[in-house]
Image: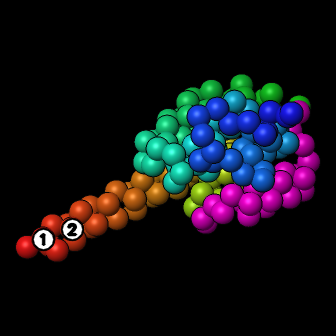
Amino acid sequence: MDANSVQVGGTHYKSEYQHWDFAVNVGMDYLASAASKYVSRWRNKNGVEDLKKAKHYIEKLIEVSPLVLLRLQHCRPHTDYINAELIRFIRVNKLDLIEAQVCNTLALWTHTNQLRIACTGIQMLIDKTTENTLLEDSNKHADRE
């Protein structure tokens, strides 16, 4: 039995192409990997809290980016290979456009401005989700009156 056939704590984010395989295949550093994990699973696990965690990991990655980028330059696979893996991961895990763009950035980033843009994308998801929740709540109250 391989590690992918087991998930501790349920089956809520088990997929044909699991995040840890994606992160290893594209040579992601720890912080980018953790952030992309939260972005790819937030709808199926902890919602906005996972998005906030993803943003926090990217903020830390921005702080340490010179060291991380130096290491990545020596071990990152070819861009064409990373792009192919990204397309597969995005398709199999049904990521929306913003989620896909964030994961793309985290797999290929070469400058901290790209990471800041990824943070902005995550904030957009947070704002959109929070806004939708507030609208749903207000509609529930209107239905009761």
Q: Are marks 1 and 2 in contact (CB under 8 Å)?
A: yes
Element class at badge 1: helix
Q: Quadrant of the N terminus?
A: top right
Q: Classify 10 Å Cα crowding around label 1: few (below 14), some (14-19), many (20 and above).
A: few
Residue drawn at 59 percent across, 34 percent down: 9
Side (left or right) of 83 relative to 54: right
Residue drawn at 51 percent across, 54 percent down: 43
**What amino acid does circle 2 point to?**
Lys
Label drawn at residue 140: 2
Percent from the top left, x then y, of residue 56?
50, 35
Residue marked by disc 1: 144
Quadrant of residue 3 in the image?
top right
Residue drawn at 78 percent across, 40 percent down: 5
The region drawn magenta spans: 75-97
**What amino acid does circle 1 point to?**
Arg
Which secondary structure dominates the residues rendered in magenta?
helix
| Residue 42 seen anywhere in this rendered image of the structure | yes
Residue 116 included in the magenta stretch of the image: no
